Image (cartoon, rainbow, N blue to C red):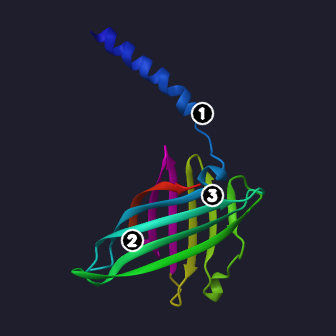
Amino acid sequence: MTRVKYFLIVMAVMMTMPVIASAKDLSISAFRGDWRGNAISESNISVNFPITSRDIDVSIKPDESGDFTITWRTLLRQKGTPESPKESLKETTLTFVKTDSPNMWKDSKGGDVYARESISWARLKKQTLTVYVMAISDAGDYDMQIYKRTLNGVNMELDFTAIRDGAIRRTAKGRLTLNNY
């Protein structure tokens, strides 16, 4: 019986080795398309809305040079009262251009954080496209938003974190499906 278990373990490891060895960075073109879904958001700063549902969509448009534009829209439900939340739509569009580093892009606008503008950059590692957005508040605190979008089969998984001066303010996790290529 022990030999059978040992054999099964060895076979399982051998079968997964090619998958592990072949894990490499995807191309930005793998993220192309219009993705739609929803997410659950958890807040450490909201008393009335510690957990909310969000409708989300993201459009990623790579061009032939390897640069890309990303637009994301989030239907928020975190104002008003829990019995009657008010909905608001937030939309952000960024265009990223390649840098000298592989799988790293910078915001084409190149904001000035000291002028209260945000700076953004993106990186692609394996199956995850991560977009970072950072700004400095009037009080001198920093705000960082991190959007990790991971391709998983036919889905895109979202893992969002908002940080202010090192403290996590909000997280959101969700799943999107490709709506249009």
Q: Is residue 69 left or right of residue 146?
A: right
Residue 100 visible here: yes
Coordinates of residue 177 in the picture (x, y in percent): 47, 54
Q: Amino acid at mark 1?
A: Ser
Residue 166 visible here: no
Q: Is residue 132 left or right of residue 112?
A: left
Residue nearest the viewer, comparing 163 with 89: 89
Q: Residue furthest front?
A: 180
Q: Amino acid at mark 3?
A: Arg
**Residue position for label 3:** 123
Rounded to the nearest angstrom, the CA distance separating label 1 from label 3 is: 20 Å
Q: Earlier in the sequence, mark 2 or mark 3?
A: 3
**Residue position for label 1:** 22
| Residue extent of the magenta highlight | 142-167
Q: Amino acid at mark 2?
A: Arg
Mark 3 neighbour class, 10 Å CA radius: few under 14, some 14 to 19, many 20 or more = some
Element type at mark 2? strand
Mark 2 neighbour class, 10 Å CA radius: few under 14, some 14 to 19, many 20 or more = some
**Residue displayed at 36% across by 14% down:** 6
Element type at mark 1? helix
Rounded to the nearest angstrom, the CA distance separating label 2 from label 3 is: 22 Å
**Residue position for label 2:** 170
Element type at mark 3? strand
